[in-house]
Amino acid sequence: MTLKRRVFWAGLLAVLIIAVLCGLFVPRRPQGEITCVIAIAAARRPGMPGAYLAAVTNTGMVPLTLRPPMVQYEDSSSVLSTDLSHSWDHGASVVKLRPGERAELFIGLRKDAKRGRVVIEYSWEADPFRRTVSRGVRLLPLRTVLPDRWTEALIRDGLLDGEYTRHFESQWMPNYSEERNGVSRDDSDVP
């Protein structure tokens, strides 16, 4: 084994040991509670019965960053597709929410979709120790060496990019569009 490979593997082992120790001995949450409320409801808009409104409210003590939202559709043949063109508050794809602030996302389900759901990722700044460790971890080619679930755990715990990251998937929302169902519906049919 060459000297370069020995140094690489020794460095990788050292970083992994530090990452494990961080996970065991460093608190996972900064001061203050990290919470947000995600609510999704049918939106009553004329001519758009397959519309929903998703609202995210930061009820915690630290700022949250909302990543670009994803809307997944399932058509009548059970084929899934993902739409990345939606944006928060009619324009911004990434939103920084201070405590008490709210962001909204209007979703109009496609006419050919049987149902849809929203996928939201949000993050907040990790503690100083994890941010420092993440600077060293980023220098290593971990994404190509480690299994995906380990890489996702490093991202989730703030050891890869210096931010804690969480993922939310809504329940599937039915499409109430009269064009899709072939019958005319009024607003009383929307839950």
Image (cartoon, grey):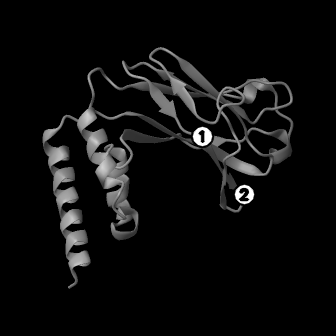
Amino acid on which disc 1 is placed: Pro
Mark 1 residue crowding within 10 angstroms, few (<14) / some (14–19) / many (20+): many
Q: Quadrant of residue 103?
A: top right
Screen quadrant of the N terminus: bottom left
- Total number of numbered discs in the rendering: 2
Residue 189: image quadrant is: top right
Q: Amino acid at mark 2?
A: Ser
Residue tagged by mark 2? 76
User: Which residue: 39% across, 46% down?
Assistant: 161
Numbered tag placed on residue 147 in the rendering: none
Q: Position of residue 158 (x, y in %)?
A: 33, 43
Task: Indicate the secondary structure of the residue bearing disc 1.
Answer: loop
User: Is residue 183 left or right of 109 when viewed as pictured?
Assistant: right
10 Å crowding of disc 2: few (<14), some (14-19), many (20+) = few
Is residue 159 visible in the rendered structure shown here? Answer: no
Residue at (43%, 36%) from the top-left corner?
123
Can residue 138 be seen here? yes
SS at badge 2? loop
In the rendered image, the quadrant that contains the C terminus is top right
Q: Nearer the viewer, residue 46 or 65?
A: 65
Q: Which residue is identified by label 1?
A: 69
Question: Which of disc 2 and disc 1 is earlier in sequence?
Answer: 1
**In percent of the image, x 29 and y 52: which residue is there?**
136
Identify which residue is drawn at 72% across, 41% down.
175
In the orientation shown, which residue stands out farthest toward the front?
3
**Left or right side of 135 for 105:** right
Seen from the viewer's position, the closer of residues 186 and 38 is 38
